[in-house]
Amino acid sequence: MHAIVLGASTDSAKFGNKAVRAFLQAGWTVTPVNPNAEPVAGLPAVARLGQLEPGTAAVLSVYLPPRVTVSLADEIAAVAPGEVWLNPGADAPEVVEALQQRGLRTRELCSIVELGYVPAMFP
Protein backbone atom coordinates (compact mmCIF):
# COMPACT_ATOMS: atom_id res chain seq x y z
CA MET A 1 0.00 0.00 0.00
CA HIS A 2 1.10 3.55 -0.67
CA ALA A 3 0.88 6.48 1.75
CA ILE A 4 1.64 10.14 1.25
CA VAL A 5 2.75 12.04 4.35
CA LEU A 6 1.91 15.70 3.86
CA GLY A 7 4.00 17.75 6.26
CA ALA A 8 6.77 15.17 6.52
CA SER A 9 9.66 16.52 8.55
CA THR A 10 13.40 15.97 8.48
CA ASP A 11 13.37 16.39 12.30
CA SER A 12 13.10 12.89 13.82
CA ALA A 13 11.39 14.32 16.92
CA LYS A 14 8.41 15.62 14.91
CA PHE A 15 5.32 13.53 14.24
CA GLY A 16 5.60 14.18 10.49
CA ASN A 17 8.84 12.20 10.62
CA LYS A 18 7.66 9.55 13.09
CA ALA A 19 4.69 8.84 10.81
CA VAL A 20 6.95 8.25 7.79
CA ARG A 21 8.91 5.73 9.86
CA ALA A 22 5.72 4.10 11.19
CA PHE A 23 4.33 3.61 7.67
CA LEU A 24 7.67 2.13 6.59
CA GLN A 25 7.74 -0.19 9.61
CA ALA A 26 4.23 -1.35 8.70
CA GLY A 27 5.42 -2.26 5.20
CA TRP A 28 3.91 0.65 3.26
CA THR A 29 5.48 2.51 0.37
CA VAL A 30 5.77 6.14 1.51
CA THR A 31 6.11 9.44 -0.30
CA PRO A 32 7.05 12.30 2.03
CA VAL A 33 5.91 15.77 0.99
CA ASN A 34 8.12 18.55 2.30
CA PRO A 35 8.35 22.00 0.67
CA ASN A 36 12.14 21.81 0.79
CA ALA A 37 12.09 18.37 -0.89
CA GLU A 38 14.78 17.14 1.47
CA PRO A 39 14.99 13.41 2.17
CA VAL A 40 12.88 12.28 5.12
CA ALA A 41 13.87 9.12 7.01
CA GLY A 42 16.09 8.19 4.07
CA LEU A 43 13.34 8.58 1.48
CA PRO A 44 13.34 11.14 -1.32
CA ALA A 45 10.66 13.77 -0.76
CA VAL A 46 8.65 15.84 -3.19
CA ALA A 47 8.08 19.53 -2.65
CA ARG A 48 4.47 19.70 -3.89
CA LEU A 49 1.47 17.44 -4.17
CA GLY A 50 1.23 18.35 -7.86
CA GLN A 51 4.35 16.25 -8.47
CA LEU A 52 2.46 13.06 -7.57
CA GLU A 53 0.49 10.69 -9.75
CA PRO A 54 -3.24 10.92 -8.94
CA GLY A 55 -4.99 7.88 -7.53
CA THR A 56 -1.88 5.97 -6.44
CA ALA A 57 -2.12 6.47 -2.67
CA ALA A 58 -4.44 4.57 -0.38
CA VAL A 59 -3.84 7.18 2.33
CA LEU A 60 -2.74 10.78 2.51
CA SER A 61 -1.77 11.54 6.11
CA VAL A 62 -1.75 15.22 7.11
CA TYR A 63 0.69 16.85 9.55
CA LEU A 64 0.07 20.51 8.76
CA PRO A 65 -1.67 23.42 10.49
CA PRO A 66 -5.37 23.61 9.51
CA ARG A 67 -5.03 26.93 7.63
CA VAL A 68 -2.32 25.41 5.41
CA THR A 69 -4.32 22.24 4.79
CA VAL A 70 -7.42 24.23 3.81
CA SER A 71 -5.31 26.19 1.32
CA LEU A 72 -4.15 22.87 -0.20
CA ALA A 73 -7.61 21.26 -0.38
CA ASP A 74 -7.79 21.40 -4.19
CA GLU A 75 -4.30 19.91 -4.53
CA ILE A 76 -5.17 17.15 -2.07
CA ALA A 77 -8.33 16.39 -4.06
CA ALA A 78 -6.30 16.26 -7.29
CA VAL A 79 -4.07 13.54 -5.77
CA ALA A 80 -7.28 11.51 -5.20
CA PRO A 81 -6.17 9.43 -2.21
CA GLY A 82 -8.43 6.65 -0.95
CA GLU A 83 -8.63 8.37 2.43
CA VAL A 84 -7.24 11.45 4.10
CA TRP A 85 -6.06 10.83 7.64
CA LEU A 86 -6.16 14.00 9.73
CA ASN A 87 -3.84 13.72 12.68
CA PRO A 88 -4.33 15.53 16.01
CA GLY A 89 -3.86 19.25 15.42
CA ALA A 90 -4.61 18.89 11.70
CA ASP A 91 -8.19 17.74 12.22
CA ALA A 92 -10.00 21.07 12.55
CA PRO A 93 -13.66 21.18 11.44
CA GLU A 94 -12.84 23.59 8.60
CA VAL A 95 -10.34 21.07 7.21
CA VAL A 96 -12.82 18.21 7.38
CA GLU A 97 -15.46 20.35 5.67
CA ALA A 98 -13.10 21.59 2.92
CA LEU A 99 -11.95 18.08 2.08
CA GLN A 100 -15.37 16.45 2.27
CA GLN A 101 -16.79 19.17 0.00
CA ARG A 102 -14.28 17.97 -2.57
CA GLY A 103 -15.52 14.40 -2.27
CA LEU A 104 -12.70 13.10 -0.11
CA ARG A 105 -13.16 10.53 2.64
CA THR A 106 -11.59 11.81 5.86
CA ARG A 107 -10.72 10.13 9.12
CA GLU A 108 -9.64 11.91 12.28
CA LEU A 109 -7.01 9.77 13.96
CA CYS A 110 -3.35 9.39 14.77
CA SER A 111 -1.69 7.62 11.85
CA ILE A 112 0.95 6.08 14.06
CA VAL A 113 -1.63 4.57 16.41
CA GLU A 114 -3.82 3.47 13.49
CA LEU A 115 -0.85 1.52 12.16
CA GLY A 116 -0.57 -0.29 15.49
CA TYR A 117 2.30 1.63 17.03
CA VAL A 118 2.84 4.31 19.66
CA PRO A 119 4.82 7.47 18.87
CA ALA A 120 7.39 6.67 21.58
CA MET A 121 8.51 3.70 19.46
CA PHE A 122 10.02 6.19 17.00
CA PRO A 123 12.49 8.37 18.98
Image (spheres, helix red, strand yellow):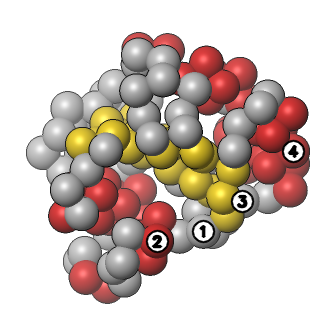
Choose mark 3 or mark 2, whichever is in front: 2
- Where is residue 53 shown, x and y percent of the image? 41, 16
| 49 sits left or right of 2 in the view | right
Callout count: 4
Question: Helix, strand or loop at disc 3?
Answer: loop
Q: Are marks 2 and 1 in contact (CB under 8 Å)?
A: yes
Sooner in the amino-acid sequence: mark 3 or mark 4: 3
Instruction: Determine the CA span between mark 3 and mark 1.
Output: 8 Å
> What is the number of the mark on residue 91?
3
Amino acid type of the residue that numbered disc 3 sits on in the rendered structure: Asp
Residue at mark 3 to residue at mark 2: CA–CA distance: 15 Å
Mark 4 vs mark 2, CA separation in Å: 22 Å
Q: Pointer 2: what residue?
A: 114
Mark 4 element type:
helix
The crowd level at tag 2 (other Cα within 10 Å; few <14, some 14-19, many 20+) is few
Q: Which residue is mark 1?
A: 109
Quadrant housing the N terminus: top left
